[in-house]
Amino acid sequence: MMNNAQDNKMPATESANGHLRKANATYGDSNLSDEEKIEAQARITSIAEETANKVNEIFSSIEADVAPKNKALELLRHVVSKYPAESEIKLKAPDICKHAEFKPYFKKGDVLTLWREIFETSLDEKAEGDMQPYEREIEPYEGEVNGAELLAEIQERLTRHIVFKNPEIQSFSCALWVLATWCIDSFNFSPYLMITAPEKRCGKSQLLGLLAKLSKKPLETGNLTAPVLFRLVQKHHPTMFIDEADSFLAKDEDLQGVIKCGIERGKALVYRLEKTPSGKFTERHFDCFGMKAISGISAKNISDTITDRCITIELRRKLTSEVMPKVRDVPGELWSVLNAKCSAFAIEAGAWLEKHRPKIPTSISDRDADKWEPLISIADYLDYAFPNEESPNYYGEKVRVCAETLSNIDTDMPLNVELLSDIRDVLNDPATRNPEKEYILTTDLLQALIGNQELRWANFNHGKEMTARQLANHLKVFEIKPKAIKQEWNKRGYMKKDFLDPFKRYLATVLAD
């Protein structure tokens, strides 16, 4: 862009052009003699040469002025590229503009504009090799895709690399979950996966990475904040894979809130105030809906309000005799073909899945029904489009067994329900059960809960045992309150009958007769 000094040079050429037009008009006059025409022609040539000289002078002057600015622009581009975070460049921009190389040419707005050109390049302008996996749109497979065979191929790939606690149930569920990531546009709920194990080196990260290879637009991370999550999901709609969640998720309540709200379409919205270019603040919402897989050593170390939204997959450490090939050793072409087949499957099944409303097992809760609905829908579609020889409802029956099995494991329980379940076990245990007594003392109940090292209550209070007050607070939500037991000289305890209604409402089985 030319400056004012350069603009002022332009009238000189316009004046010369005016003289040239006038000379041409004179030369074209038919009343002129031959000598006058020769004289006019010479004058035209002279004016034209003068005009060309002046134009050359102007452009030489412009080049002399622009060259330093272009050099400064290249230097500025190099400096700005060192600050990929928008918040950081906003802080640094005023200082950058004060440097002697940039001060004559650039202001803060120019620095921010250049930053956006560098870091907010549209996906269409990016080369395929520069795109992250969560930015890529996969071209569908050109040949015919058999959905049942595709599911079997995904399940076989999972069991080849991973030791599941319940291989048939859990690998089948994970394979359906992979297909659900490709068909997510047809669903109103996004089931989460919680990958957990009792100890380290059980293959949690291996399974997470394997699922990422198979899923649509995977984004893998070992740590992130709430603003990063909802902005990434809003912009790219990826399938999130969050590793080692037990090490940081419990400390970040904002991140927990964003993850929890992302399960239902239309309600997975996060609102924030953002500053406009004019300096005013305006509200903006971010859509956090999408599939997520989370891994951690123990689901008990992660908020129960998150695990309640997850299908829990438990792994086991492999034996020395078990040989499991590494995911990284699988040729990339295999993943590309599987991804293309999954993309084609989603296109073929999408309309059917969008209209289908599957029958959900009555034995699972409403929350479990929401997260299993997409997987059950896909199984029903496989029965419809690719019927199995064993049974016309082969896939549908199998996934419903998976739903009932995986919806009733302990790691899926909210904290208060887990406590209620453990109290039920104490009251049913022959060692502590006393049919003649209609009550149980608080001290006896706590001793039974804390004495079982497999339960969480011995280390419940930051490594210390659960107290009587904490027990009372957690049971209060079920309207179960301690009372003074007259038969025990007014010691505090609980009436067994007070547990019966919560047992019926929240647990599958109740007190033994």
Image (tube, rainbow, N blue to C red):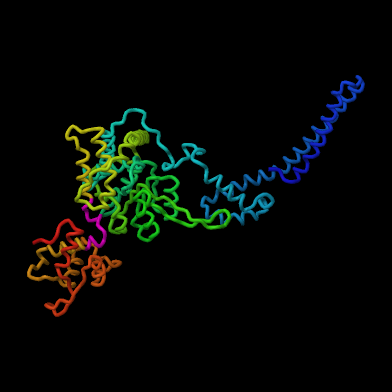
Report if residue 45 is visible in the image: no
Displayed quadrant of residue 347: top left
- Whether the magenta-drawn stretch holds residue 303 is answered as no
For residue 155, which quarter of the picture?
top left
What is the magenta segment's predominant secondary structure?
A: helix
Q: Is residue 93 left or right of residue 317?
A: right
Q: Residue at x 19, y 58 (%)?
A: 507
Residue 378, position as x, y percentages in the image: 28, 40
Q: Which of the pair 174/271 is nearer the observer?
A: 271
Which residue appears farthest toward the top when viewing the image?
A: 34
Q: Is residue 372 at least partly visible in the picture? A: yes
Report which quarter residue 466 is drawn in. bottom left
Total count of labels: 0
Position of the C terminus, as image quadrant, is bottom left
Q: Residue furthest left?
A: 436
Q: Position of residue 428 (x, y in %)?
A: 12, 62
* Front-most of residues 283 and 465: 283
Residue 333 position within the rendered picture, expressed as x and y whole percent measured from the top left: 37, 33
447 with respect to 345 (left or right): left
Residue 408 belongs to magenta span? yes
Viewer-closest of 435 and 301: 435
x and y percentages locating residue 278 in the rendered image: 58, 55
Q: Is residue 488 above or below residue 117?
A: below
Q: Residue at x 59, y 54 (%)?
A: 93
Which residue appears farthest toward the bottom when viewing the image? 489
Which stretch is magenta? 407-419
Task: Identify which residue is drawn at 42% across, 52% down.
Answer: 230
Q: Does residue 294 appear left or right of residue 476 in this picture?
A: right
The quadrant of the rendering that contains the N terminus is: top right
